[in-house]
Image: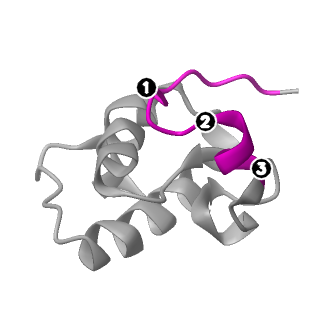
């Protein structure tokens, strides 16, 4: 099992369990929650911790949610490589 730590202080366990798979950067593993602006920013910061084989999927999902929440991704971000 992949364990990724994000700042999830505002997302309680019960709330996390109630999120649909689509609210995660990697839906199949339910990691990298992208349910609000703070979690999207955390996922951007933690992107380098994602296993390489999952980075393309995570990058795509972060980009979609960043647009939805009007969050700018730096041109220098590793996300732009995918």
Query: In the image, what residue occupies the spot 30% across and 78% down?
Result: 68
Q: Residues under labels 2 and 3: Cα distance? A: 9 Å
Of the image marks 1 and 3, the number of the one nearer the N terminus: 1
In the displayed structure, 16 sits above or below 62; it is: above
Q: Quadrant of the N terminus?
A: top right
Query: In the image, what residue occupies the spot 74% across and 65% down?
Result: 21
Please name whichever residue, 59 or 24, is drawn nearer the observer in this view of the structure.
24
Q: Give the label on residue 44, or none.
A: none
- Where does the image place residue 73, in percent across and percent down from the top left? 18, 55
Circle 2/circle 1 CB separation < 8 Å? no
Query: In the image, what residue occupies the spot 55% across and 49% down?
Result: 33
- Where does the image place residue 56, in percent across and percent down from the top left? 55, 58
Instruction: Residue under label 3, please give it.
Output: 17
Query: In the image, what residue occupies the spot 38% across and 57% down?
Result: 36
User: What is the magenta range?
Assistant: 2-17
- Where does the image place residue 16, in percent across and percent down from the top left? 67, 47
Instruction: Residue under label 1, please give it.
Output: 7
Of the image marks 2 and 1, the number of the one nearer the N terminus: 1
Label 3 neighbour load within 10 Å: few <14, some 14-19, many 20+: few
Instruction: Residue under label 2, please give it.
Output: 12
């Amino acid at each position: 099992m992949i364990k990724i730590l994000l700042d999830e202080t505002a997302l309680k366990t019960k709330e996390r369990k109630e999120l649909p798979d689509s609210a995660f950067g990697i839906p199949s593993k339910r990691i990298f929650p992208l349910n609000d602006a703070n979690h999207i920013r955390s996922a951007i910061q933690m992107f380098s911790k994602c296993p390489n084989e999952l980075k393309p999927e995570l990058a795509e999902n972060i980009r979609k949610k960043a647009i939805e929440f009007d969050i700018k991704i730096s041109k220098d971000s590793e996300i732009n490589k995918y």
